[in-house]
Amino acid sequence: MRDSELVGLWSSDARYGPGAQSDDWLIFKPDGFGWYEFLNWMLCSAELFQWETPQLGVLRVIGERHLQISDDLRSLEEEPSLFGTQEFPYQIAEEDTPSGKRMRVLRLPLKIPMRDCFGFARRDLSGLEEPKFKLER
């Protein structure tokens, strides 16, 4: 089972502006594939996973792999997922945000170093593909 309310792109910066130099994106595709991206001027790291909601308000993620750009920006390092298989409580609610806008907000206490609050950015994921890293040549 998958909660269709999760489907889409969620952004930590969406709650503030947008406008920051960095952002965290959490993407949930309807087919059960998803990923987290940390961006700081460019894509720096990504966590790829499968997802489902065994019950409303509970997200199960099954980590696939962790990708990170190397320090010299020339190669991509691949490691086992930081997630493993975990379940997290989540909540989606309309909230007033620091930007002064009212929007849907996802609260998700992840147990790895990433934000736990995301504003809904968009449902349409067409053209959005698995993370693309821009490496120096």
Image (cartoon, rainbow, N blue to C red):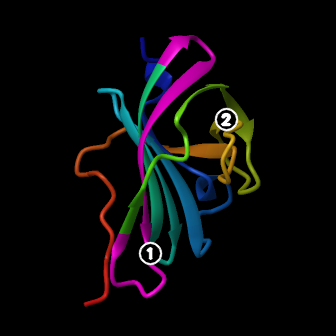
Q: In this view, does 103 lie above or below 94?
A: below
- Residue 104, position in %: x, y? 61, 35
Mark 1 vs 2, N-terminal side: 1
**Among the 4 quarters of the image, the one containing residue 7:** top left
Disc 1 element = loop
In the image, 126: left or right of 91?
Answer: left
Predominant secondary structure in magenta? strand
- Residue 87, numbered circle: none
On whether residue 77 falls in the magenta region, the answer is no
Q: What residue type is labelled 1?
A: Met
Q: Which of 100 and 104 is in front in this view?
A: 104
From the image, tell me which residue sits under label 1. 42
- Residue 108, numbered circle: 2
Residue sitting at 29 percent across and 27 percent down? 31
On whether residue 56 falls in the magenta region, the answer is yes
- Residue 85, position in %: x, y? 52, 29
In this picture, which residue range is highlighted in magenta?
A: 53-76
**Among the 4 quarters of the image, the one containing residue 75:** bottom left
Whole-Å distance between the Cαs marked 1 and 2? 24 Å
Question: Which image quarter holds the N terminus?
Answer: top left
